[in-house]
Image (tube, grey):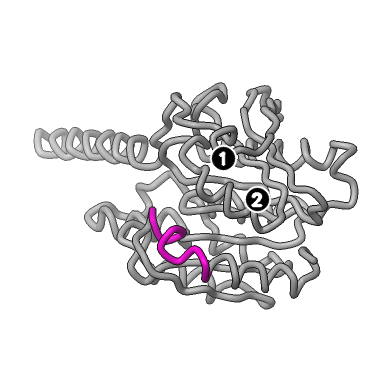
Amino acid sequence: MKIILYLIVICVLFIVFVRYLERTSVFYPDRMLAATPQELGFPYEDVFIQTQDHVVIHGWLVKSSAAQSTLIFFHGNAGNIGDRLGKIDLFHKMGLNVLIVDYRGYGKSEGTPTEEGIYYDATAAYDYLAGRGDMTGQNFISYGASLGGAVAVDLAAKRTVSCLVVDSTFSSAADMAKRIYPFIPSFFIQTKMDSIGKIKNISVPKLFIHSAEDQIVPFALGKKLFDAAPEPKEFIEISGDHNDGHFDDQVKIKNRMTAFLKKWNLMS
């Protein structure tokens, strides 16, 4: 009987340990905004959007004159929108409108991040844009980097977007957990982020960007997601680590992404 009790206690403690690892590994929100688009010298709008579960999230809308498409930008699991000015600048100079939002619990957004919650944040961002009179006729691009790739895929599965761009992202949370915590059985992991299951039903053009030198999200998981996706799709292999690849290979990303968007009439 004592052995059984000991085993139960050990199991309970292990589950508590796994839940703690999950909670501390998935989201690293930062409330302090280090900078704004004002530092880049172009105008922007502060936007506050209410989600379907009544959480108010914050974002920036950066408009480009004569843009045909608006890129909805979902960032990774750490920091906030203030750490993404380099990419905002890149997309703006490409001639795109950019709406970047902070998930709940990040920056000026209310609430606490959860997987279900950040999907609500994404659909709220889309619905906000779709409801603006000055966005009539715009093409919407769902773009996500790292963890944001899972958010972008989920949005593309739920709303009508013109294309999907995923950058340095993974196939599923279970696949990532196997790489980071191989000692934890996958059935213990509550977080799903099942992009590989969702992407099979997404028919719009898809662009995948990943570095073979990525030290955080394995290149193999990015390729696994790409392989599971139906046509039409393209893959851009870049160089550099997880956080700096878009700087190290910025010209390649800009040229290839511009060509991709022009191919599908999303840029002139």
Question: Per the image, is 251 magenta?
Answer: yes
Tag in front: 1 or 2: 1
Label 1 sits on a secondary structure element that is: helix
Q: Amino acid at mark 2?
A: His
Determine the residue positioned at 64% across, 75% down.
233
Which sits in the foreground, 221 or 108?
A: 108
- Which residue, given by chain and number where applicable, does mark 1 sit on? 40
Magenta stretch: dominant secondary structure: helix
State the residue in front, 202 or 241: 241
| Left or right placement of residue 215 versus residue 58 in this view | left
Q: Which residues are magenta?
A: 243-252
Instruction: Specify the amino acid type for callout 1.
Output: Leu
Q: Residue at x 30, y 60 (%)?
A: 215
Who is closer to the viewer here, 266 or 248? Answer: 248
Q: Residue at x 71, y 62 (%)?
A: 163
Percent across and percent down for residue 232 are: 69, 76
Q: Quadrant of the N terminus?
A: top left
Q: Mark 1 or mark 2, which has the lower sequence index?
A: 1
Rendering quarter of residue 132: top right
SS class, disc 2: helix
In screen coordinates, is 44 left or right of 192? Answer: right
186 versus 113 height, above or below = below
x, y percentage for residue 236? 52, 73
Is mark 1 in CB contact (under 8 Å) with mark 2?
A: yes
User: Which residue matches tag 2?
Assistant: 92
In this image, 237 relative to 200: left or right? Answer: left
Q: Residues within 10 Å of mark 1 (few under 14, many from 20)?
A: few
- Mark carried by residue 253: none
Q: CA distance from mark 1 to mark 2?
A: 10 Å
Where is residue 104 drawn, in percent x and y?
55, 29
Q: Residue 233 lies in magenta, yes or no? A: no
